[in-house]
Amino acid sequence: MRGSTGYLRSSELRTNLAFAFALPGVAHAASGILHLYVFLFRRMRYLLAGLVKLMTGIWKSPNYTTIWVGWLITVNLLVPIFFWNHPEARVIAVIFLAGGTLMGYLTAETGFSRLLGLGHVFWYPLLIWLAMRMEMFPAAESFGLWIRALMVTNAISLVIDTVDVIRWLRGDRAEMVDFA
């Protein structure tokens, strides 16, 4: 409302000025959120393309590789479901999923190369953590047996992965399978 003089009252002026200055800020924030969504969508498409190529590469690998990867998935992702009440099982599953995500990005960046061994880098601290807690997992119980099987499996995989990453660093950067 305008006062008797025809001018805006000071409280109305403050409100109008606040709105006038806030509107560009809101528009800028909305623009920023839109840019974030577009960026995340593009990254997600990139990751999904990498994961598809990763899975295709695994299926085109020799049978022993496919069987080994199936065993890794079973021990690191499926079996933890049966022991979900243990925090170790949840940590193992999350670390496996994080490694798989990293492998998707690595595949998108470098193809199905030996650098994929880097995707299991999170297993080094995992194995140390589990080894320090080994006395909590009696070998006579199914949980303790699974933890021991997981540690042996992941240690073997880390040896293979370390050799692969060293080979990649030394120049063996070709894709490991033919996608033609």
Image (cartoon, rainbow, N blue to C red):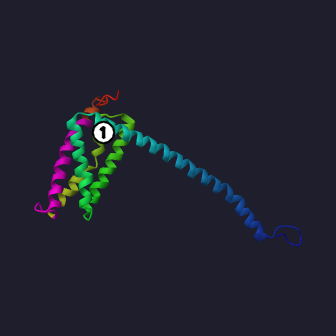
Res 118 seen here: yes
Image location (x, y in percent) of residue 79: 23, 55
Confirm whether the magenta stretch covers residue 164. Answer: yes
Confirm whether the magenta stretch covers residue 99. Answer: no
Figure check: 165 above or below 100: above
What residue type is disc 1 on? Answer: Leu
Task: Name the one closer to the observer, 46 or 125.
Answer: 46
Task: Name the one closer to the observer, 79 or 132.
Answer: 79
Residue extending furthest right?
5
Which residue is painted at 67% across and 59% down in the image?
Answer: 22
Residue extending furthest top?
180
Which residue is painted at 70% across and 58% down in the image?
Answer: 21
Taking the image as shown, residue 39 lies to the left or right of residue 156, namely right
Taking the image as shown, residue 4 lies to the left or right of residue 59, namely right
**Which element is circle 1 on?**
helix
Taking the image as shown, residue 145 lies to the left or right of residue 102, namely left
> Residue beneath label 1, please?
116
Which residue is painted at 41% across and 42% down in the image?
Answer: 48
Q: Quadrant of the C terminus?
A: top left
State which region is magenta: 136-165
Res 134 seen here: no
> Which of the 4 image quadrants contains residue 128?
bottom left
Which residue is painted at 22% across and 51% down in the image?
Answer: 75
> Which of the 4 image quadrants contains residue 164?
top left
Image location (x, y in percent) of residue 129: 22, 57
Image location (x, y in percent) of residue 105: 38, 41
Q: Main secondary structure of the magenta part?
A: helix
Residue extending furthest bottom?
4
Image location (x, y in percent) of residue 1: 82, 70
Disc 1 packing (10 Å; few <14; some 14–19; many ≥20): many
Residue extending furthest left?
140
> Which of the 4 image quadrants contains residue 51?
top left
